[in-house]
Amino acid sequence: MPNNNPAGERDLARPPRHIAIILDGNGRWAKKRGLPRTAGHAVGAETFRRIATYCKNIGVEYLTVYAFSTENWRRPEGEVSTIMKLLGKYLHEAIDTMERDHIRMKVFGDLEGLSPELRALVQKTDEISRRYEGFQANICLNYGGRDEILHAARRYAEDYAAGKAEGELTEERFSGYLYSAGIPDPDLLIRPGGEVRISNFLLWQCAYAEFYFTDVLWPDFTPEELDKAIAVFRSRDRRYGGVKNP
Ligand code: FPP
């Protein structure tokens, strides 16, 4: 079974290799201030920038965030279009940062549901990412965990039918069909915003992740909050279904 840390040992000096975050609470943050929900998303995008920079600086290798789910299309049209505009603006600006700091950025999700402009930006960030090896940020966009697994199963079935999938279908091989192919599973999943559920996020990949929930709303999430989550993560005993010192 694929396992980032087969010995199940905690390395107290190192941060988690891969952190996943469900960005939640933007709307409530704005409402509390008498602002439109979209203002919360704008601040949330800045929070993402700050947290991604912090993750890179402390040696986290991968940061994956849930920005827009396959279900989020049900929101009012104005809110959806503002989120899409913000994402476009963010990706556009990120291109310069990626080149300057040698950062990789990927989008996980069903790209066919996105506008041609966003798809072009995703293609560009993919191209740049192939050139570098450092910190990688993954933005889940038009993403659903079940949808990802189905998508992977369909692609595997196509390869199988075409005679391109010889040998046994293992967990490792199946993982290669997910959007996250080649990336280690998240060690720590953080959900700000007070809800205690996974909401169809990285269902396959979070099999052994440690979960951290906080009432802090995403726009208020700071590097200090991330430090708290990492401290809790470090205090956990990860056994991957095994036992320690039997
Ligand atoms: C959840 O808060 C947030 C979203 C559905 C959108 C997140 C999108 C962004 C922050 C835009 C840009 C993102 C990046 C990564 C650049 P909510 O609206 O569900 O909040 P609520 O639960 O308080 O209503």
Image (tube, rainbow, N blue to C red):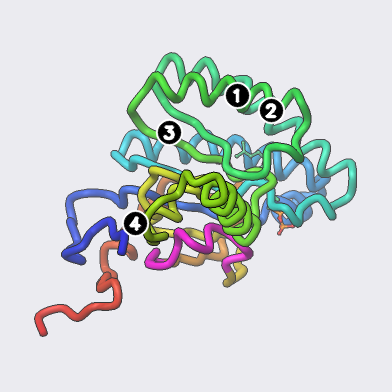
On the image, the x and y values in percent for residue 238 come to 27, 70
Drawn side of residue 48 relative to residue 29, left or right: left
Question: Relative to 142, is 49 above or below?
Answer: above
In the image as oriented, which residue stretches furthest toward the left?
245
In the rendered structure, find residue 230 and report the number of the disc placed on it: 4
Q: Which residue is mark 2?
A: 119
Q: Amino acid at mark 1?
A: Gln
**Mark 1 to mark 4 CA distance (whole Å):** 32 Å
**Mark 1 to mark 2 CA distance (whole Å):** 6 Å
Q: Amino acid at mark 3?
A: Thr
Q: In the rendered structure, which disc, 3 or 2, sits on the residue that comes first in sequence?
A: 3
Magenta segment: 198-210
In the rendered structure, find residue 123 and report the number of the disc placed on it: 1
**Mark 3 to mark 4 CA distance (whole Å):** 16 Å
In the image as oriented, which residue stretches furthest toward the bottom?
246
Which of 184 and 18 lies nearest the eye of the viewer?
Answer: 184
